[in-house]
Amino acid sequence: MLENQDLTPAKTRLPANLLAFALPALALTTSFGIGAVQALALLLFAWYFRSGVFACYRDNWRSVRPMVLAFGAFFAFSLLRLVIDQQPLRTLDGPSRMLFGLACIGVFCHLKPQVRHFWLGLCYGTLAAAVLAVLQTQFWDMPRAEGFTHHAITFGDLALAMGLMAICSLNTSRELRYLPALALLAGIVASALSASRGGWLAFPLVALPLARYGYQMHGKRMLVALGMAAALCVLAYLVPATGVAQRVAEAVSDVQGYLARGDATTSVAIRLELWKASWLMFLENPWLGVGRDNFDLALHALAAKGLIQNSPALAYSSSHNDALHFLATGGLLDFCLLLAMYAAPFQFFRNMLHAADHGQRPLALAGMVMVLCFVGFGLTDTMFWLMAPKLFYVTMACSLAGICLYMTRGANVPRRILVTRTDNIGDVVLTLPIAGWLKQRYPGVHITFLVRRYAAHTVGQCRNVDQVVAIEDHPDLAQHFRAAGYDTVLLAFPKRSIAMAAWRAGIGRRIGTSHRFYHWFTCNEMVRFSRVKSQLHEAQLNFELLRPLGLKQIPPLQEVWPMYGLQAPASEKVDALLGAQGCNVILHTKSNGNGREWPLAHFTELARLLQAHGDVKLWLTGSAPEGELLAQQAPALLALPNVNNVCGKLDLRELLALIGRSDGLVASGTGPLHLSAALGRPTLGLFPPIKPIDIARWGALGEQAVNLAAAQACGQCQDKNACRCMEAITPQQVRDVILGWRRRT
C-alpha cells in the first residue's frame, strides 16, 4: 500500500480531523450529530471555496460528476415539482439537505483529514450505539432501542450499516487493533435490540463484496470476522432472550395471515397492504406519481374506493419500501432518480476499489457496503423519506468520496498503459505517436501495445513502446490483463471482446469512444468526437483518447511525426537484395482495398519514364495475392528491366528493413506508406481529393513525406469504379518527385 505525503497545513488539519471523527461518532449517539457535521462542512466549503475546494471539483469532475448530477437532479426536480404542483415548502427540506451534502466532497478532499480519525469515529460510534441500545432496553424499560433517532428501525439499520462499514478497516492501523471486529459485533447487537427485522436483508447483499474485496485487502482475518458475525446472528436467533426468533416467527405468521385471511392488522401485513396501495398509486399515476406530499390522501382515497382494507395501514405516511414509495409519490421520474442516487456512489466506490491502491480501498469498500446496506434497508423501510437516514447516506457517501479523492491524487498518473490496436498495420503506425506523447508527459510510464501477430515485430521497433503483445497468443485476455497489472487501457481500435476482457480484468481506467454501444457498459471513461466531421488527421484523432488522462491538447502535425519513434531493423536478406549502389525506390501498387489506388497503367508509364535514369531501381512490394494480380493486370510493368517484383517474398519485418534501406517509397493510402513516413524515409502519398480519405485525414506524415492529389474532384467520386481523381495525378508528377530524391541520394 502506498502512503500519501501529508502536506496539509496544521491549521486546517484540526477541523478536518474533527469532522472525520464526528461524522460517524455522533451519527447515532446524538440527535444533532449529522446535521451539525453538514452545517460545519457548509461553512468550511464557503471559507475555502476559492482557495482549494473548487479546484477539487474541477480536477476530479469526471469522477464526481455522476454523484453531483444524481443528488443535484433530485433537488432540481424537487424544486420544479414544488412550483408546478404547488407543494408545501417543507417538501424541499430533504432534497436541499441532500444537495448541501455534496459540499462534503470538496471539503474533505481539500482539507485532507487523517483517515484513522474516521475509522476511530466509526468504531467508537458503533460501540456507543450498542451501549445505548443495552441501556435503553435493559435499564430504561424501553421495548425497542431507538437511540436518539426516535425511530427504532432507523437506529437498528444505521447501527448495522456502521458495523459492517467498520469491519472494512481491519489491518489499516495498529491503533485500531480489534476495534473493527468489536464494532461489527456492536452493530449486530444494536440492530437486534432495536427489534428491526428488515435490516438483516442487507447481509446477503454485502457478504459478497466484503468477502471478495475484504479478503484481497485483509486476508483470512476478514473471513474470520465475517464468520464470527454469522455465528453471532445464529446465536441471537437461538437465544430466546434476544427476541430474534420470536420476531422471525411473528413475521412468518403475519404473512400467512395476510395471504390466507386477508388480515392486515399485524406488523408485516401492514407493510404488505402499504406495498399494495403504493403499487395501485403508481398504476394510476405512472409518470409523476400522486405527489410527494400526497401519499396519505391517496392512501385514504384507495380505501374509500374499496381497493384496500380499512386497516391500521391508513395511519402510515409512507410505503415502507423505498422503490415503491418513489414510484407511488413521484412515478417513474422519481424512481429513476432513486436508482441514480444508488448507482452513482456505488460506481464511484467501485472505481476506487479498482484504482491503484494509495490507501483508499478500505474506504471505498466501506462506501460500497453502505450503498448496498441502504438498498437492503430500503426493501422494508423508506430510508429516503425519513430525514436521518437520507442525511446519513448523502453526508457519509460524499465525505468518503472526498477522502478517497485526496488519497488518490497522484494515483491518477498512469503507470502501466495498454493500447489496443488489432487492425491493419497503417492504423497501428498512426497510433504510435501517442506512445511518444505519453512518454513525454509521464517519463516512467510502461506502455504495452496489443496487436495482431503479424504487426508485433514492427511495433517492437518503436522506442516508445516497452512491450508488444500479440492477441493470438492469449486466448484468455482477461487473465493476461490481470496478470500484467495494467491500470489504464486505451481502446484505440474498438472491439467488443477486448473491451469485455478489460472490464472483467478490472483494469482501473478503461477509455473508449462513446459511439460504441458496448463501451457504455465496459468503459468507465469515454471520449466523444466525430471522425466524419473532424478536420484533424487520423494520427491526431488518436490523441482524443488521452483526454481522460488530463492530456487535452492535440499536438499540431509538425509535432506528431517526430513522436513515431520507429526504427528499421537490420536484414542480411534485404542487404543482399539491394546491393551497394543505386537509387532504390519502392512502388507499393495495391492497398488491400483500403483506399483509392493509382492506376497500374500510370505505374507502368512511371517505370518507363525512369528507364532513362539507369541507376534508379524499382521494387514492387505487396502480398502474394497482390503479386498474382500484378501478373494478370500489369504484365508490361513486370517485364521492364528496371522493375523488381518482390511481392509475397518479404514478411513485414523484412519489408520494414527494405523501406529503411530504400531511397523512397510511392503508394496510395496504405500501411507501407505510413511505415515509410514514420521511418523518416522519402515518401510520396497519392490521394483523391475526397473526404474522408483525402490527404488531410490520411496523408503521409514525416520529415521527408509529401503527398499529391488532383486539384479538384472529378464529380464521380461516389462510384469507386467511375472515379477519375487518381488518374489526374500524372506519372510525370511522380517522376519529378522521385528524381528529387535521386539528386539527394
Image (tube, grey):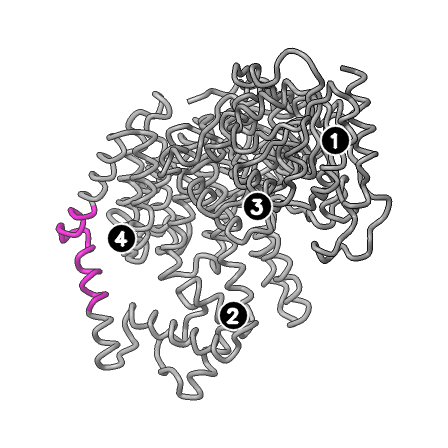
Q: CA distance from mark 4 to mark 1?
A: 93 Å
**Which residue: 38% across, 44% down?**
369
Residue type at tag 3: Gly
* Distance between the alpha carbons at the discs numbered 4 and 3: 36 Å
Task: Name the front one of labels 2 and 4.
Answer: 2
* Earlier residue among tags 1 and 3: 3
Measured as percent of width and height from the top left, residue 542 is found at 64, 37
Q: Secondary structure at mark 4?
A: loop
The image quadrant of residue 375 is bottom left
- Is residue 3 positioned above or below 628 on the image? above
Amino acid, disc 2 = Thr
State whether residue 223 is above or below residue 738: below
Where does label 3 land, which residue? 101
**Residue type (three-letter) at the residue carrying disc 1:** Leu
Determine whether, in the image, residue 593 is placed left or right of residue 743. Answer: left
Q: Is residue 722 above or below residue 629?
A: below
The tag on residue 141 is: 4
Residue 329's tag is 2
